[in-house]
Image (cartoon, rainbow, N blue to C red):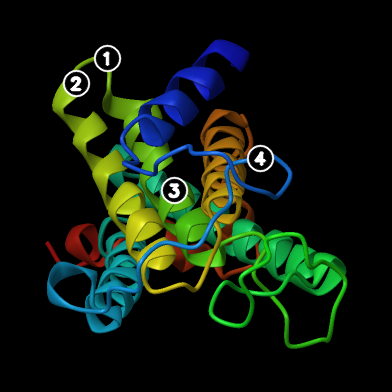
């Protein structure tokens, strides 16, 4: 599992064209980049990607159901996204790091309650969403690794609009990858599914055949 975690994290990190020039922050790479909220980096597209991914994962879980192999993967992706959201939100309130939109110093931690730069919740959520599919299907369908481009794009976009520092998005990716692998590898049924009535195990596509 450790090798898989490293492989997926490396796959995502090396797809990020974030210049590792001298800077500050915990990794020494954090620096402000030129603000860019245009074209493909526009905030609107980032939001569409996140909300679209949440909708797709939720819909896939309900349509296929956990008794279906693909549906089970959707449910595990749902678990990973929810757990990741809880973890990153807690960390944001704990570390209270200021965003590059508010300061040019990447070393301003434990500030006001509105300072929530570390880690990137969006990159973490997108990483958590795609990793279960990569873990499950990469051996048979290597093209599934292309899903890593989704959180990679969002990571670059979040840095470009000065919503996060470079270490914020890398930390978010690492959290999402780790939780995604854990959610996929655990032998028990998906956690959230266990909280719902048994009828959710059978997806709509099977129920109405």
Q: Please, what secondary structure does the residue beneath circle 4 have?
A: loop
Residue plotted at (32% across, 79% down)? 47
Mark 2 burial class by Cα count in 10 Å: few <14, some 14-19, many 20+: few
Q: Where's residue 26, x and y in %?
A: 74, 44
Distance Cα–Cα, label 4 vs label 2: 34 Å
Distance Cα–Cα, label 1 vs label 2: 6 Å
Residue, disc 4: 28
Along the polypeptide, which appears first: circle 1 or circle 4?
A: 4
Residue plotted at (78% across, 67% down)? 108
Distance Cα–Cα, label 3 vs label 1: 19 Å
In this rendering, does residue 181 appear at all? yes
Instruction: Give the vertical position of 178 relative to 206 (above or below).
Output: above
Whether the residues at callouts 3 and 2 have beta carbons within 8 Å, the answer is no
Q: Answer with left or right where residue 30 lies relative to residue 144.
A: right
Q: Answer with left or right where residue 32 lies relative to residue 106.
A: left
Residue, disc 2: 142
Residue, disc 3: 127
Q: In this rendering, which labeled residue sits more in front, label 3 or label 1?
A: 3
Whether the residues at callouts 1 and 4 have beta carbons within 8 Å, the answer is no
Q: Answer with left or right where residue 73 lies relative to residue 173.
A: left
Q: Where's residue 161, x and y in %?
A: 38, 74
Along the polypeptide, which appears first: circle 3 or circle 1?
A: 3
Q: Please, what secondary structure does the residue beneath circle 2 have?
A: helix
Q: In this rendering, which labeled residue sits more in front, label 4 or label 3?
A: 4
Mark 3 burial class by Cα count in 10 Å: few <14, some 14-19, many 20+: many
Residue, disc 1: 139
Q: Which mark is residue 147?
A: none
Residue plotted at (61% across, 34% down)? 182
Q: Please, what secondary structure does the residue beneath circle 3 have?
A: helix
Residue plotted at (20% across, 16% down)? 140
């Amino acid at each position: 599992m450790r090798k898989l975690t490293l492989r997926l994290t490396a796959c995502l990190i090396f797809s990020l064209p974030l210049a590792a020039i001298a800077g500050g922050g915990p990794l020494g790479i954090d620096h402000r980049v030129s603000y860019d909220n245009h074209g493909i980096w526009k905030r609107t597209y980032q939001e569409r990607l996140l909300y679209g991914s949440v909708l797709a994962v939720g819909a896939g879980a309900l349509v296929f159901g956990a008794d279906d192999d693909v549906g089970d993967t959707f449910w595990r992706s749902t678990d990973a996204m929810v757990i990741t959201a809880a973890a990153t939100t807690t960390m944001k309130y704990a570390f209270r790091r200021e965003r590059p939109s508010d300061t040019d110093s990447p070393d301003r931690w434990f500030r006001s309650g509105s300072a929530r730069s570390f880690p990137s919740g969006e990159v973490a959520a997108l990483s958590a969403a795609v990793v279960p599919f990569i873990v499950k299907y990469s051996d048979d369908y290597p093209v599934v690794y292309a899903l890593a481009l989704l959180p990679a794009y969002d990571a670059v976009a979040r840095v470009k609009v000065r919503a996060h520092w470079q270490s914020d998005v890398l930390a978010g990716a690492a959290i999402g990858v780790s939780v995604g692998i854990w959610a996929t590898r655990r032998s028990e049924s998906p956690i959230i599914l266990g909280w719902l009535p048994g009828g959710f195990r059978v997806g709509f596509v099977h129920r109405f055949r």
